[in-house]
Amino acid sequence: MSSKSSPGQFAGPDSRYPVPDPYFRRLCSQLLCWCAVVFFLLAGSGCTTGLSGSSSQIELPARFSSEGGAPLPDQWWQALGDEVLDDLMDRALTGNLNLKIAWARLNQAQAQARISGAGIFPSLEGQAGLSRSWLHESGRTDENGSYRLALLASYEVDLWGRIRSQRDAALLDATAGQQELQAAALTLSAQVATTWYQLIEQNGQARILEQQIQTNTQLLELIRLKVRTGQAGIADLLQQQQLIQTSRGELARLRSRAQVLGHQLAVLLGLPPDRPVAPGVDSLPALPLLPETGLPAELVQRRPDIRAAWARLQAADQRLSVAAAERFPRLSLSGQLGSEAENIGDLFDNWLATLAGNLIGPIIDGGRRRAEMARTQAVVAEELHSYGQIVLNALTEVEDALVRERQQLLYIEKLERQQLLAEQAIERIRDRYINGGEDYQRVLTAQLSLQGVQRNRLTAQRELYEFRIQLCRALAGSWELEPSASLNRVGRRS
């Protein structure tokens, strides 16, 4: 009576009790020896790198030059109390195409992190095959066929943490991408607010210019009456007419700028440029109190661009670990289990299993791995200095915005005083001109001075808003996009 034996076993005197195949025992012994060698190498060597003890080497100041008194909301623009701006922000954060591009890049980085981490786990593949052959000879055709099923497994033992370091570097890249997305959203919010208040200023400039044209037209009628009565020359009339035409030409330019700003605002919201997106507001609201600036150390923890730079630095350090691990041997394991038969019903009657190990280590590479190690060390140094520079830039942005706002308030105060004096002067000079006590040149000079101050004051108020926007953007607040909610909104609007 014959009995079937499987690979790895052979039938002994009593086939009911199979004993191990000597070749199978030899293979197991070799694998055990390899495991012992690997354990010895792990116990005796190591390739760790890290940023422990490293810092940006930037001495942070204890506080900013101004501290402010009003709490800054998480979404900083809400501190301005502008309902139109709130609506524009909501639409921009869900519709802006550049922000959607940043979301897509973040998804790519997160997927790449999952790809990089896949090597930590063993891989298992299945194979299925069918072959048929026909032999025609002497008028006779013979047909042969076979079926094959197999499982193939492979695994690289992460002896020195190379694969884990690659995965961690990719995860840190994804973290940096998420922070860069937050920074992009913060920049977008500042662009929307700046464009909106520039549009308000242009509308306000147009309103002021229309009022000035109306005033100049009234004075033109007075001059025309004086010319008729012989109290003024024709030159005064011509100069006043020229002033009115100049104002009308400037009014056309203002309206053109307002339309262009409306186009820019629509594009920021992800809409066609000819789409109206905001009402025609022509006056700037009162600026709220200066927000709390907090401490410089808190700013470093809060700013998304600083957090992104820190993640990039950590990712570079992980790649340094990868470069160090490349200089040591690699151990890979592979296995295969398969069965082949002429009939599909006999597939599992006979089977074959193999197990193999492979230890590969560098011997001579022309210094390539050592050079790669030096390169990645230089990358870490570059990222470290870049991180420090970004910290300095953040501190500078806050201080610059604070200084500009302080000085702008003084400038606006002087403009208000100038406007008051110019209004008083024009009233007296105009009355004296009507009564014949002043020539037209004094009237024209006073009139141009008053109208220039009026427009400069509105521009200064808009610049003050921009400095406040720059300060809020520099402080960043604690506002963060919610990935799932934002992605869902973007998907619905796409």
Image: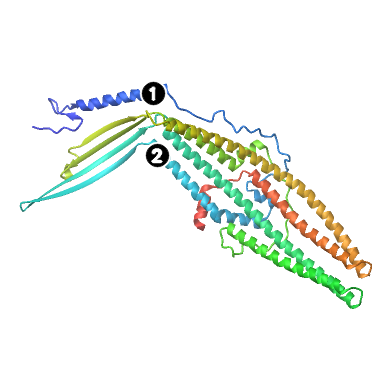
Residue 70 in sight: no
Q: Earlier in the sequence, mark 2 or mark 1?
A: 1
Mark 2 residue crowding within 10 angstroms, few (<14) / some (14–19) / many (20+): some
The residue that appears at 30% across and 41% down in the rendered structure is 125
- Secondary structure at badge 1 equals helix
Q: Is residue 301 above or below residue 431?
A: above
The residue that appears at 49% across and 32% down in the rendered structure is 374
Mark 1 residue crowding within 10 angstroms, few (<14) / some (14–19) / many (20+): some
Nearer-the-camera pick, 49 or 100: 49
Which is more foreground, mark 2 or mark 1?
1
Which percent across, then down, holds residue 299? 64, 39
Disc 2 residue type (three-letter)? Ala
Which percent across, then down, holds residue 297? 64, 36
In the rendered image, which residue does mark 2 sit on?
A: 118
Q: Is residue 187 above or below residue 315?
A: below
| Image quadrant where residue 352 sits | top left
* For residue 430, side relative to residue 465 (left or right): right
Nearer-the-camera pick, 229 or 416: 229
Residue at the limit of the structure toward the front, as seen here: 366
Q: Quadrant of the N terminus?
A: top left
- Rendered image: mark on residue 323: none
| Image quadrant where residue 37 sits | top left
In the rendered image, which residue does mark 1 sit on?
A: 41
Residue at the limit of the structure toward the left, as seen here: 138
Disc 1 residue type (three-letter)? Leu
* For residue 432, side relative to residue 175 (left or right): right
Which percent across, then down, holds residue 280? 68, 63
Q: CA distance from mark 2 to mark 1?
A: 25 Å
- Secondary structure at badge 2 equals helix
